Image: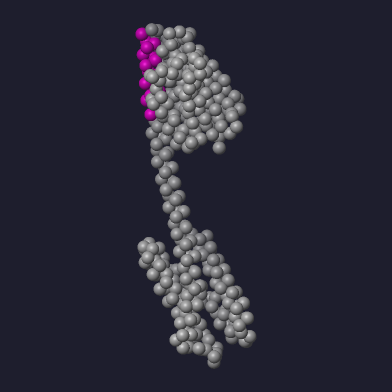
């Protein structure tokens, strides 16, 4: 608040000093008189500042900036003339006090002077109101951006919260299948699940996490699925060490790996593989999740995992965050682009 006040007074002083400077030039060219003329000129500096400051207080007190535009224009024109009249009257009083004998006070001369004095006051209004409009526009834009950011943050949190039940449902289904097949393996899977949930609770609090944490979570999940599928599932991580500390949205890889297991490996008659890759390509972090299988009509392109990931990438990175799914020979490949800037 103090900073704004300082800027206001600096602008007042500079603006009226400029007005005084212009008048000094033209006044000096037109007249070759004594000090009295210059006394009147220099008197206009504090007078102009005083009149406009009182006027500004009235604007703030009566909330003129909230008026409709036509009303504001009428207000500006009327008070520009009124301020010019007050300015002229004050200058005239000082002139009479200093003893100017050639002072013209006929109607035409008075009207001419009042109109001339109205010009700087009118420009003062334009600058002041223009600055306030710009200031209010910026404030409104910032508030809109904050509201937009808050809504996107809320949407991101909602999307992220969808994944936990989805992940839990898939994990519990895996353990349930193991109970009938091998109780011992089911116990190991429960232990794995508890480790995963502990990690998930920590990860879920963050909007972005290091790639390293996501990879650790995926490893735990695949270890649990390995207990269930045994030799039917194989997995491999090809992660560039230089990208392990790069930030990514939580569960962005996990969701694709779950899809690879559920809609790829589980439907294969024989063995299958999952390959997780991460590397840099320019200023983009490339994530690639590949699994053996074919993209069929049952592929969940609009399911929770895929749809959720696409929405989160769009919300966080705009058009730069992308997710693509393609069929490459006997592999289903999910490519994810995460911009680093």
96 is higher (above) or lower (below) than 145:
below
The residue at 41%/45% (across/down) is 147
Residue 10 vs residue 127, the one in the foreground: 127
Q: Position of residue 274 (x, y in %)?
A: 50, 16
Residue 275 vs residue 9, the one in the foreground: 275
289 is higher (above) or lower (below) than 104:
above
Q: Is residue 170 visible?
A: no
In the rendered image, which quarter contains the C terminus?
top right
336 is higher (above) or lower (below) than 38:
above
77 is higher (above) or lower (below) than 227:
below
Residue 156 vs residue 280, the one in the foreground: 280
**Residue 226 in magenta?**
no
The residue at 60%/80% (across/down) is 27
The residue at 39%/11% (across/down) is 178
For the stretch drawn in magenta, the main secondary structure is helix
* Colour scheme employed for the rendering of this structure: one colour
Q: Position of residue 78 (x, y in %)?
A: 40, 73
Q: Position of residue 197 (x, y in %)?
A: 43, 23
For the image, the number of numbered tags is 0
Q: Is residue 154 visible?
A: yes
| Start-end of magenta stretch | 162-180
Where, by quadrant of the figure, is residue 236 drawn? top right
Where, by quadrant of the figure, is residue 268 drawn? top left
Left or right: residue 250 versus residue 66 is: right
**Residue 173 in magenta?**
yes
The residue at 45%/64% (across/down) is 129
């Amino acid at each position: 608040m103090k900073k704004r006040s300082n800027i206001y007074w600096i602008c007042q002083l500079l603006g009226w000093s400029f007005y005084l400077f212009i008048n000094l030039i033209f006044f000096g060219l037109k007249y070759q008189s004594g000090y009295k003329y210059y006394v009147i000129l220099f008197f206009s500096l504090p007078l102009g500042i005083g009149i406009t400051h009182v006027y500004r207080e009235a604007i703030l007190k009566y909330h003129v900036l909230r008026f409709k535009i036509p009303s504001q224009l009428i207000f500006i024109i009327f008070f520009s003339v009124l301020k010019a009249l007050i300015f002229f009257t004050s200058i005239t009083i000082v002139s009479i006090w200093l003893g100017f004998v050639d002072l013209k006070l006929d109607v035409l001369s008075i009207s001419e002077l009042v109109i001339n004095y109205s010009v700087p006051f009118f420009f003062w209004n334009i600058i002041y109101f223009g600055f306030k409009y710009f200031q209010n526009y910026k404030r409104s834009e910032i508030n809109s951006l904050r509201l937009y950011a808050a809504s996107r943050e809320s949407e991101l949190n909602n999307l992220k919260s969808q994944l936990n039940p989805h992940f839990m449902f898939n994990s519990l289904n895996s353990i349930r299948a193991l109970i009938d097949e091998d109780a011992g393996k089911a116990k190991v899977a429960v232990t794995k699940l508890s480790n995963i949930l502990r990690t998930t609770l920590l990860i879920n609090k963050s909007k972005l996490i290091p790639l390293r944490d996501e990879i650790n979570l995926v490893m735990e999940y695949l270890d649990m699925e390995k207990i269930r599928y045994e030799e039917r599932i194989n997995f491999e991580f090809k992660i560039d060490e230089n990208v392990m500390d790069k930030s990514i949205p939580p569960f962005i890889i996990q969701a694709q790996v779950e899809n690879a297991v559920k809609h790829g490996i589980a439907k294969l008659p024989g063995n299958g593989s999952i390959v997780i890759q991460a590397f840099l390509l320019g200023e983009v972090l490339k994530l690639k999740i590949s699994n053996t299988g074919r993209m069929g009509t049952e592929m969940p392109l609009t399911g929770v995992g895929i749809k959720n990931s696409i929405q989160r990438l769009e919300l966080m990175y705009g058009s730069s965050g992308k997710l693509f799914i393609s069929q490459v020979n006997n592999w289903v490949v999910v490519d994810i682009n995460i911009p680093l800037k």
